């Protein structure tokens, strides 16, 4: 079976994410970039040692709450589209549970590494560099796919 034909609830590898439509990757990338921007703004305002952990908890709660609420509406007849045809907004709650663990770990990496870096150097240039790295890393499935089709 082509991984792009797998249904959302049948994902069993991180490589499967390479089959998401570009709009889905763009939404995930925008979420990471926006979170890094807000993190950058928060660092000088909250120098307390516990601040990054509290901020991470808030970010994860904000990212997972819609999933929990939307999953409560799922029924046995819920349709699970193939990975290649998923919609970022209407299908974000239909993944296997392990995908949310991986996504939360990814977001934790960006929040905590961003907080650490911004604590050392809180400049617009540092933010720009972090955003560029996060963009390339998070949007890479689409970028790589684009290179393969040439």
Image (cartoon, grey):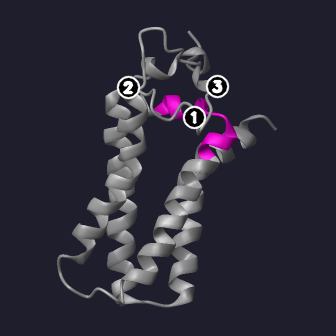
| Front label number (1 vs 2) | 2
Q: Are marks 2 and 3 in contact (CB under 8 Å)?
A: no
Q: Nearer the viewer, residue 75 or 20?
A: 75
Which of the labelled discs sits on residue 71, or is there none? none
Q: Residue at x 78, y 34 (%)?
A: 149
Percent across and percent down for residue 19 are 60, 30
User: What kind of element bears circle 3?
Assistant: helix
| Front label number (1 vs 3) | 3
Q: Which residue is mark 2?
A: 96
Q: Nearer the viewer, residue 47 or 113?
A: 47
Q: Nearer the viewer, residue 147 or 2?
A: 2
The image quadrant that residue 110 belongs to is bottom left
Percent across and percent down for residue 10 are 44, 17
Vertical comparison of 20 with 132: above or below: above
Q: Overall secondary structure of the magenta stretch?
A: helix
Please tell me which of labels 1 and 2 falls first in the chain. 1
User: What kind of element bears circle 1?
Assistant: helix
User: What kind of element bears circle 2?
Assistant: loop
Instruction: Determine whether, in the image, residue 143 is placed left or right of residue 98.
Output: right
Vertical comparison of 82 with 140: above or below: above
For the N terminus, the quadrant is top right
Range drawn in magenta: 15-25
- How far apart are labels 2 and 3 at the CA level? 16 Å
**Label 3 crowd bin: few (<14), some (14–19), many (20+), radius 10 Å:** many
- How far apart are labels 1 and 2 at the CA level? 16 Å
For the C terminus, the quadrant is top right
Which of the labelled discs sits on residue 18, or is there none? 1
- Toward the front, the furthest residue is 73
**Label 1 crowd bin: few (<14), some (14–19), many (20+), radius 10 Å:** many
Q: Residue at x 61, y 33 (%)?
A: 20
Q: Which residue is mark 3?
A: 84
Instruction: Determine whether, in the image, residue 52 is placed left or right of residue 137.
Output: left
């Amino acid at each position: 079976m082509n991984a792009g034909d797998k249904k959302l609830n049948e994902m069993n590898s991180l490589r499967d994410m390479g089959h998401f439509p570009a709009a889905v990757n763009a939404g995930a990338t925008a979420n990471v970039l926006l979170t890094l921007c807000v993190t950058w703004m928060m660092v000088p305002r909250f120098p307390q040692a516990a601040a990054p952990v509290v901020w991470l908890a808030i970010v994860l709660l904000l990212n997972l709450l819609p999933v929990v609420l939307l999953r409560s509406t799922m029924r046995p007849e819920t349709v699970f589209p193939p990975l290649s045809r998923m919609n970022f907004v209407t299908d974000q709650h239909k993944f296997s549970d392990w995908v949310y663990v991986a996504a939360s770990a990814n977001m934790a990496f960006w929040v905590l590494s961003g907080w650490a870096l911004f604590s050392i150097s809180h400049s617009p240039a540092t933010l720009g560099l972090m955003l560029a790295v996060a963009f390339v890393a998070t949007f890479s499935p689409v970028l790589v796919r684009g290179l393969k089709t040439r």
